[in-house]
Amino acid sequence: MKTIRNMTLIDDDDIFVFLTKKAIQTTNLVELIKVFGNGLDAINFLKENCNNSDALPEIILLDLSMPIMDGWQFLDEFTKLAPKIDKKITIYICSSSISPSDVLLAKKNNLVSDYIIKPVSKEKLIELIKGLIDAI
Amino acid sequence: MKNELSDYKQALDESAIVAITDQKGTIIHANDNFCKISKYSREELIGQDHRIINSGFHPKEFIREIWTTIAKGEIWKGELKNKAKDGTTYWVDTTIVPFLNEAGKPYQYIAIRSDITFRKEAEENLIKYSNALEITNKQLVDFCNIVSHNLRAPLINIAMLVDFIEQSEDEEERKEVQVKIKPVINHLLEVFNELVESIQIQQDAGIKIDEIVLEDCLEKILIGFETQIQEYNASIKIDLDGVSTILSPQKYIESIFTNLISNALKYRSTQRKLEIKIKAQQLKDTILIAVSDNGLGIDLNMHKNHIFKIRKTFHKHNDAKGFGLYLIKTQVEAMGGRIWVESTVDVGSTFFVEFKTLMI
């Protein structure tokens, strides 16, 4: 079975991270799940590894409201970093915010594939990952 | 012709406030309307410099501009705030026309004015209301964001946990997940209480305003932090610069100082001995209080729009909840004041709070 090597969660919501990891692990579709509790830790990791394709994720689930560096600020930083990265990284925003202004902002951002409002069901996760596997 | 002119004058006197001055600005004619609005008798006005009715409201440059215009022989039109004999002020829509001699030089000025005090007051009120509305509107947007995210997030967590438990067939796993529900409920309650507290402030319009003796108030708050101040060997400098009292509800002022001082202690740098400075300053219609520290500082390029938002934190600190600054901003704004911050990472932060000296 085809799998994704690396999925990254950038989210400070421990419950979401815990349940998402559990759900994904049972699918055996992802080899490694990396978690960062805020945007800054994530962007620092990506910067350090921008030449190390193996360490980079194929997919990122990005929360918006986080301490230190939030999801929007992460996207700003990632925009600057993206030209240096030789790997296609698909980013989904995963937020509990139903604020229309957040949804609109996300739709305007080319780096963001979609805006997913939490809760995210296991089926939805599988759909996202399978879609990505088919595209690779 | 002569008759027509005098009819004209009579009509003008009837409708307008009229004054004539010589080229130096000495009043040589004042009509009844002018006496009435300025509350001076004609005898008191004639021979006086026209500045007798200056209110001091307009900047010097603005007044100078009027004089340069009319001294050149040009007409000046505009709105002026003047002062009556009893010290009250009034607004007039003003046209000043220079009378020119054969050489084209002004030898007299006639000022024709109409009373627009009512309209100006209405305008000022409108601006006041629209400012207040703008703040209320911002708070409403904040409120919507809080509900749509901060309250929704823990609810979603609970829903997801319960779903998981229902679907899981492994008893051990169910237990593992079950214990995660309670903390989320506590968190939900906490956010809910914060929300209620901040809504109460916004509706606190009738809250009792106390005259706070600043020195006593600060002393009381600092005693509460004594252990920490000693533990960190922090130095606290207070410079009240003659400001002795402040008008504020006791609860608000204590909350404002407590939060700012607690933040300075919490986000101190381990590289330097902590110094906190509290400075007060009497400005024109306000009292400005600055609380500065030499701590970690906040990256304003990144966070400037979030500093005072609920549940926003900027440092890794276990106690950081992102409620204090949000709460005190709500309190400061409820008093018609302002709060803002200047900060440099690893140098320190200064929080400024501006209090109105008069309560409306």
Image (spheres, coloured by chain):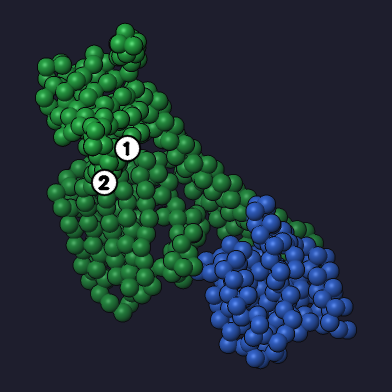
Chain colours: A blue, B green
- Picture quadrant where residue B285 is located: top left
Give B218 or B336, whichever is nearer the viewer.
B336
SS under mark 2: helix
Does residue B333 appear to the left or right of A17 in the view shown? left
Q: Are marks 2 and 1 in contact (CB under 8 Å)?
A: no
Q: Which mark is residue B117?
A: none
Out of B323 and A110, give the one closest to the viewer. Answer: A110
Residue at horizontal 60 percent and vertical 78 percent from the top: A80
Judge depth for marks 2 and 1 and give the one in front. Answer: 1
Query: Can see residue B327?
Result: yes
Badge 2 or badge 1: first in the primary sequence: 2
Which quadrant is home to the C terminus of chain B? top left
Residue corresponding to mark 2: B61
Residue plotted at (24% across, 68% down): B275
The location of residue B157, given as percent across then percent down, is 66, 58
Please indicate whether residue B175 sits to the left or right of residue B314 in the image.
right
Q: Nearer the viewer, residue B132 or A65?
A: B132
Viewer can see residue B250: no
Give the residue displayed 26% in from the left and 26% down from the top. B110
The answer to whether marks 2 and 1 sit on the same chain is: yes
Name the residue at 33% across, 73% down: B347
* Element assignment for label 1: loop
User: Left or right: B41 with respect to A106?
Assistant: left
Task: Name the kind of residue labelled 1 in the image.
Answer: Glu
Which of the pair A52/B231 is nearer the observer? Answer: A52
- Callout 1: residue from which chain? B
Q: Amino acid at mark 2?
A: Glu
Mark number displayed over residue B74: 1
Report in which chain the residue with disc 2 lies.
B
Quadrant for the N terminus of chain B, please: top left
CA gap, disc 2 and disc 1: 18 Å
